[in-house]
Image (cartoon, rainbow, N blue to C red):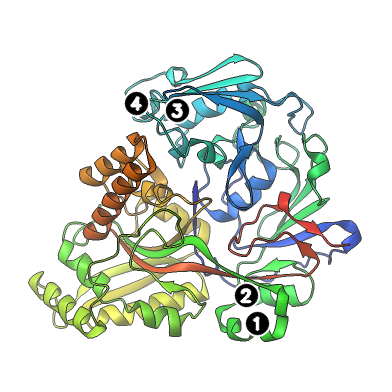
Amino acid sequence: MGLRIWAKAACGIALLLPAAPASAADKILARWNASEPETLDPQFTTSASDGQVEQDLFEGLTRLTTDKKAIPGIAESWTVSPDGLTYSFHLRADAKWSNGEPVTSADFLYTFRRLVDPKTAAADFDPVQGVVNAAEIIAGKIADPAALGVEAPTPASFVIHLKRPDLALLQKLADRVVYPLPQAVIAKFGGEWTRPGNIVTDGPFTLRSWVPHDQIVLDKSQTYYDKAGIALDEVRHIVVDNENTGFLRWQAGELDVTRPPAKEIPTLGARFGAKVHRGPSRSVNYVMVNMGRSPLGTDHRLREAMNLAIDREVINTKVVPRGQQSAYSFVPPVIDGYTPQELSFKQMTMAERVARAKELMAEAGYGPDHPLAVEVTYFTNDEARTIIAAIQQMWAQIGVKATLTNEEFQVYMATLNHKTHQVGMIGFNIGFDDAAQFLRIYRSNAGDLNDAGFADKEYDADLGKADQALDPETRRAALEAAERRLMTEMPVFPLSYGNETMLVSNRVQGWVDNDRYTESRYLSIKE
């Protein structure tokens, strides 16, 4: 379970029509969303902007608590066979779609089969990686998605057959890609099924309106099985793609929640006190290299030199000081039960790193008199531009001439998905403590999430060992071996681990300090 983010913001300045300030009596939450969603079809989304809305609209077999533990969702209970290969779920009798029809096992059957069908071209397959025949169907080796190891013996029971035990399956089943989907609605409206008036959902909120680049408004669902447990009447996901604008709107009372600009962070505590929420997040920001394009994808020396030349401490303490920690591994240290595998040069001084980088560039035939031309694509955003410009200067000193190209966020996501970039920059955020959720995105078959196009047999094999592990220690060792391989091959250059700083109105109760995407279901408005 993970989503691509940029922990700095998304897109450029936009002047938006202000939403009317919410009053406590209305129980309306106005929350910041960093960019216009690509879509609200859960099987096609990769960005956190989409996921923030989808988690309000849908619910899977399980759902996650605020501390990221799996609990019953649409499935009220389940049993697991002694060998760990068969999960039998019993669905709630009162689970309903927003049109009043019951949610049944047939809905999950449709969803799982749609996900693995190559015709769907879904963005992510992680929750079903271990299901019988999933890999073969995704790869086109088995033509019929009905061969997938799932079944619906009765309308209230859904069974998953695994080819290997999966210690994180219950958490994965809370992921957006396996939310139940309304087959009849999709058949009727096609690609327009997620528009207001068409969409049918099963979560705690329903879609009332969607004004592109402005706001998405949700109402409390009247058919949700736990309607009484939802405290909010309305949620406004307001697109504010510039943090300065969001900061001003938050101060004006137009937003209950926003992410402040980095320049404001040093004085926030003194100015806003308890309204400031801070905490380390399960996220990493990084530069990635398109491994399908030469010379970077084919010459390790060039990747290592460029990685060495990035002064992470300068970026994180001077260029964009958010209190974030410099990253030398892809998996953040905040993940429980795991030891991050760090880049080998972490203990070198910056002067030693630059000297070694120059040696590697010279060995590869490049230097100040014969610079390596590189195009870096990033999305239009002031902080992203500032960071990339700083890295551009760091690379220049070792003989890399970087040209910078910016794109609107949705265009940039398409660029990464289609692998038309040479070098890019993005972030990745996961929903629960599991190192595998970071490492899985660079499997050779990870689809759109594999923004580096990394394909390495040794890396895949290590992740395969983790998949097949029957105990946590064996799994952890295999995952650590995979990360060591990733840090050795260097398709990615970690920059920083996320440290969330959010501004939350005192009227909002239940906010989780280290989770920028706290689910609206867990929030309330103080009377």
Q: Amino acid at mark 1?
A: Leu
Q: Amino acid at mark 4?
A: Glu
Q: Amino acid at mark 3?
A: Asp
Q: Position of residue 222 (x, y in %)?
A: 83, 38
Q: Could you give the CA–CA distance between mark 4 and mark 2, rounded to whole angstroms?
A: 46 Å
Marked residue nearer the N-terminal end (3 or 1): 3
Marked residue nearer the N-terminal end (1 or 4): 4
Q: Amino acid at mark 2?
A: Pro
Q: Are marks 2 and 1 in contact (CB under 8 Å)?
A: yes
Residue, disc 3: 117
Q: Secondary structure at mark 2?
A: loop
Q: Picture quarter containing residue 76?
A: top right
Marked residue nearer the N-terminal end (2 or 3): 3
Residue 397 is left or right of residue 57, and the answer is left
Please report the residue visible at 52 percent of the width from the left and 50 percent of the height from the top.
Answer: 432
Question: Extreme top residue here?
Answer: 153
Please report the residue visible at 27 percent of the width from the left and 42 percent of the height from the top.
Answer: 460
Marked residue nearer the N-terminal end (4 or 2): 4
Residue, disc 2: 260
Q: Are marks 4 and 2 in contact (CB under 8 Å)?
A: no
Marked residue nearer the N-terminal end (3 or 4): 3
Query: Of tags 2 and 3, which is closer to the observer?
Result: 2
Q: Could you give the CA–CA distance between mark 3 and mark 1, rounded to whole angstroms?
A: 49 Å
Query: Of tags 1 and 4, which is closer to the observer?
Result: 1
Residue, disc 1: 268
Q: Secondary structure at mark 3?
A: loop
Q: Nearer the viewer, residue 439 or 245?
A: 439
